[in-house]
Image (cartoon, helix red, strand yellow):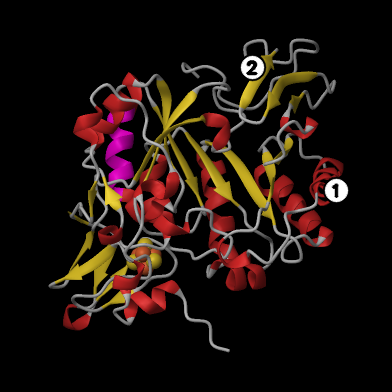
Amino acid sequence: MVEITRRDLIKKGGKGILACLAFGAGLGLPNFSDATALRPSRGKLGIKLSPYYAALEGKVIKCTLCPRECEVDVGDRGYCEVRENRAGKYYSLVYGNPCAVQVDPIEKKPLFHVLPGTKSFSIATAGCNFDCKFCQNWEISQARPEETFNFDLPPEQVVKLALRTGCDTIASTYVEPTVFIEYMLDIGRVAKKRGVIKIYHSNGYIQPGPLGDLLGVLGAACIDLKGFTEKYYREVTEGDLKPVLETIKAIHRHGTHLELVNLVVPGKNDDMEDIRRMCQWIKTNVGPDVPLHFSRFYPRYKLKHLPPTPIATLEKARKVALDIGLHYVYIGNVPGHEAENTYCPKCHELLIHRVGYRIVENKLNHGHCFKCGEKIAGIWNKEK
Ligand code: SF4
């Protein structure tokens, strides 16, 4: 049987039947005092000329933003559905028009080694350069911006609202933020001047050039290392593994704080030998101090038929990672599990006690173990 994807339908002109998306896929609006200024309107576009394309013959363009390198005819869009060729020039349609705006605990990103217990102003536009079969936010990630309810939020306004809502960070998250890079870059520039840290939660599927631009404004990155075989990436995400590994290495080389997330999907990427190879790769290429989060899968989107990840599988994966020598290995989406906590890699003392996204106790002493004095990798205060 041939599976018809949502993108196939859009390309066949079937987008009308998909036009019933609610704002932010259920993501909530922060309680702003000037919320009236923040009324989303359906299909609002934010047009901005992209610097990330090359002109080919006959006004065709090649997008140079992500490894997919879409070649796009006049009037068409790339795979992510949010970048369009207009008369031989390539435009982003998602500059300043997020469809999801929310204040989250930073632990939800998940970033466990960045300002624990603080709030992160989180935004996303429509669109994505992957189509993960387990996507939790597919209503917006697989949508065109015409189909979502979008806010009018220029970069300055995002930073202003972040400060007003007491957020120390601004996260681009929920979908793949690479597709709204022009917006992210401008938010990052303003945020840097105002002392707010810019965060990027990404699938890592980006070309080295634009990534270099981003690294100039980012304070921290959380990259999904979704699996460790090309087969898994192709079948489950429609992407490739190799560029993601290059992104992870580049972020680490740059010295930007990095955390990794591996969603363990039963029967798909839970082979312990693959997990062992992945952990060994992490240790060799970015070192043992990069936190790794093994996240529990719940049935969603195109993988509704699979069961949630057994907790025993996550614990086995964590043991593999710890045995290899990774220092900070977490289990996510299992509230109350002891592997939500941060332990000192040297004396094993409990340092940060978490339950879900809540910090119960933080015993770090200026970024060091309060007991043995070991330095703990991370951003523990805003000055660092
Ligand atoms: S960013 Fe979008 S248009 Fe550009 S190559 Fe990637 S999927 Fe294609």
The answer to which image quadrant residue 170 occupies is top left
Left or right of residue 52, residue 323 in this image: right
Is residue 365 positioned above or below 178 on the image? above
The residue lying toward the viewer, choosing from 154 and 223, is 154
Who's the residue at 75% across and 53% down the image? 309
Left or right of residue 231, residue 94 in this image: left
* Mark 1 crowd level (few <14, some 14–19, many ≥20, 10 Å Cα): few
Can you identify the residue that label 2 sits on?
367
Of badges 1 and 2, the one in the foreground is 1
Who's the residue at 16% across and 72% down the image? 88
Q: Is mark 1 within 8 Å of ligand 1?
A: no
Who's the residue at 53% across and 82% down the image? 3
On the question of residue 259 being in view, the answer is yes
Amino acid identity at mark 1: Ala
Q: Is residue 201 magenta?
A: no
Residue 312 image label: 1
Residue 63: percent from left, percent from top? 32, 67
Residue 36: percent from left, percent from top? 21, 31
The residue lying toward the viewer, choosing from 14 and 350, is 14
Is residue 316 positioned above or below 234 on the image? above
Who's the residue at 33% across and 47% down the image? 99
Amino acid identity at mark 2: Gly
Left or right of residue 192, residue 26 in this image: right
Disc 2 element? loop
Residue 73: percent from left, percent from top? 23, 79
Q: How would you classify the magenta stretch by its main secondary structure?
A: helix
Q: Where's the N terminus, which quadrant?
A: bottom right
**What are the residue bounds of the magenta stretch?**
182-191
Count the marks: how many?
2
Q: Is residue 185 magenta?
A: yes
The answer to which image quadrant residue 346 occupies is top right
